[in-house]
Amino acid sequence: MIRFLNRTLGIYFMVAQIATAAECKDINGAEVSDASAYLQRDRSTLLDGCILQALTRLQTVADVEGIGLLVKYLDFQRPLTGLEKRGIFLRPLTTYELFPAVTNLFVIGKSAIPNLLSLIGQGGGSNLARRNAVETIMLILKSDEPAGVALLNEASRSSTDVIVSRHIFEAALLAVERCAPRDRVQCGAALDGTSRP
């Protein structure tokens, strides 16, 4: 997994270099706080390459503000490399390769889960952002996918808000679909509440 993450982060670094120093002057060589400030601007005015550079700088920020900012960028897809633009892929690209915030939140780990649950429950962001939030939770709990489904199911059941509960339950259904075939029965049991949370 570490080798994969290094390769993924390497791809992000390569793609981020597409944006020139002049285009990204506000974050080029900047501190994490500058990258954070850049990402808080009106997203429609930001350049994709600069967004990627800023997100790359936030890859180890595990504070509440940094995690919240990464969650807002769950639907940001990194720019394709030159070869990818021409349709040349070594293999199909995965969610965590295409969406840098997914990778960053995965690296941060379990401390990102409350923010991800909040996005899912509130129905915030785009459909893609919510799907990526589910994917991120399941990546964080990859070694025990039924635990990811159980976590979503428990969050759904414990919510007193009907709308939030429904959104999180729908996310639990999606999580069951993405469970590995060997874990499907246990994931289904976690959804029914017949397995451990």
Image (cartoon, rainbow, N blue to C red):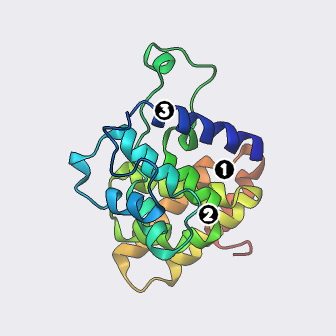
Q: Which residue type does callout 1 highlight? A: Cys
Q: How many marks?
A: 3
**Is residue 76 positioned above or below 187 on the image?**
above
Q: Is residue 37 left or right of residue 143?
A: left
For label 1, count other residues whose C-alpha is less than 10 Å away and answer few (under 14), some (14-19) or many (20+). Answer: many
In primary-sequence order, the first of circles 1 and 3 is 3
In this orientation, does residue 185 appear?
yes
Placement of the C terminus among the 4 image quadrants: bottom right
Residue 1 seen in the current view: no
Judged from the image, the secondary structure of the residue bearing numbered disc 3 is helix
Name the image quarter holding residue 160: bottom left
Q: Residues within 10 Å of mark 2 (few under 14, many from 20)?
A: some
Mark 1 residue element: loop
- Kind of residue at disc 3: Val
Earlier residue among tags 3 and 2: 3
Instruction: Give how far across and how far down residue 144 sits, in percent.
Output: 75, 60
As measured in the structure, the alpha-carbon distance from the residue carrying label 2 to the one carrying label 1 is 21 Å
Q: Which residue carries the number 1 mark? A: 179
Instruction: Determine which residue is flagged by label 2.
Output: 108
Q: Find numbered disc 2 in the image and state the secondary structure of the residue it sits on.
A: helix
Instruction: Give me the disc on residue 15.
Output: 3
Instruction: Return the residue nearer the eye: 56 or 188.
Output: 56
